[in-house]
Amino acid sequence: MTNARKLLVALLAAPAIAIGAEEVKLDRAPINEHDLISLQRGAQVFVNYCLTCHSAGFMRYNRLQELGLTEQQIRDNLIFTSAKVGDLMKIAMDPRDAKEWFGVPPPDLTVIARSRASDAGSGADWLYTYLRGFYRDPVRPTGWNNTVYQDVAMPHVLWQLQGEQLLKTEERPLPGGKKVKVQKLVLEKPGTMSPLEYDRLVADLVNFLVYMGEPAKRSRIELGIYVLLFLGVLFVLAYALKKEFWKDVH
């Protein structure tokens, strides 16, 4: 097949591909980047459940002091290896072993909240929906699948907290007597947390992941406000000076 014919086939197939790739509706992530308690809880969840497989290779432990934690608190509660407070948040897992175990090396999560942003919603919305969208799937090697990321290689590491969900299909009536099939997640076996508690935990974790993607965001915004105020005052003085210089010019 010539290159021209290949291009023609690709263009003809594109509409069909677009129709088949349905966007998943993302839930709004109830995060607050100014809530230091939420960020501290999120950091604790991250180091306990995520940092075993996923690194945060562009984030240092000592930056957590910006969340109101002391070096001693970070050392005692958030570092479980021989790492120092000034070290990067890396893992000991060899990428080759990770690829053999999971099929693909777990990605670094430093900027995951920024990289997952799309037209469907923010990266925070994607992560919030994803971490609540795991369900049992005996066909998958890990026994888990996800409504947001189909055929995901990652197992549901928070399943003991959330419990086990199943993806069930039900028919809903439409006007005119027609019916439509809708898939929904059903909590089959409750976990150690209630659904509300689990949602709060995921929100805290996502809050921390958003912060980790740009730790200087809060200070940058505060500095920007001061700069705008300064420019506002400077504008008034410059305008008054201009009027003084040009008052005798007609």
Image: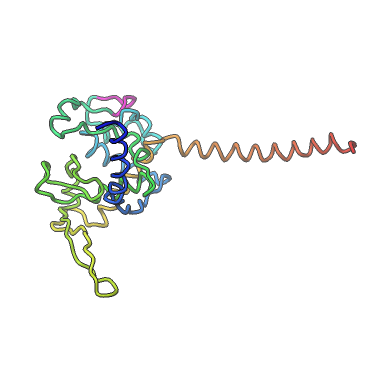
In the displayed structure, does residue 206 sit left or right of residue 136?
right
Does residue 57 belong to the magenta stretch? no
Residue 84: x and y in percent read 29, 24
Magenta-highlighted residues = 83-89
Q: Residue at x 28, y 44 (%)?
A: 13
Q: Residue at x 23, y 62 (%)?
A: 182
Residue 154: x and y in percent read 19, 40
Residue 18: x and y in percent read 31, 48
Q: Residue furthest left?
A: 138
In the displayed structure, does residue 95 sit left or right of residue 69?
left
| 134 to 235, vertically: above or below | below
Q: Residue furthest bottom?
A: 176
Q: Residue at x 40, y 46 (%)?
A: 35
Q: Residue at x 21, y 48 (%)?
A: 146
Majority SS type along the magenta span: loop
Q: State the colouring used for the structure image.
A: rainbow
Does residue 88 belong to the magenta stretch? yes
Assign the N terminus to one quadrant of the image.
top left
| 89 to 207, vertically: above or below | above
In the displayed structure, does residue 230 sit left or right of residue 25?
right
Can residue 201 be seen here? The reply is no
Can residue 198 be seen here? The reply is yes
Residue 194, quarter of the rendered image: bottom left
- Viewer-side residue, 241 vs 100: 100
- Viewer-side residue, 45 vs 97: 97
Residue 157: x and y in percent read 18, 43
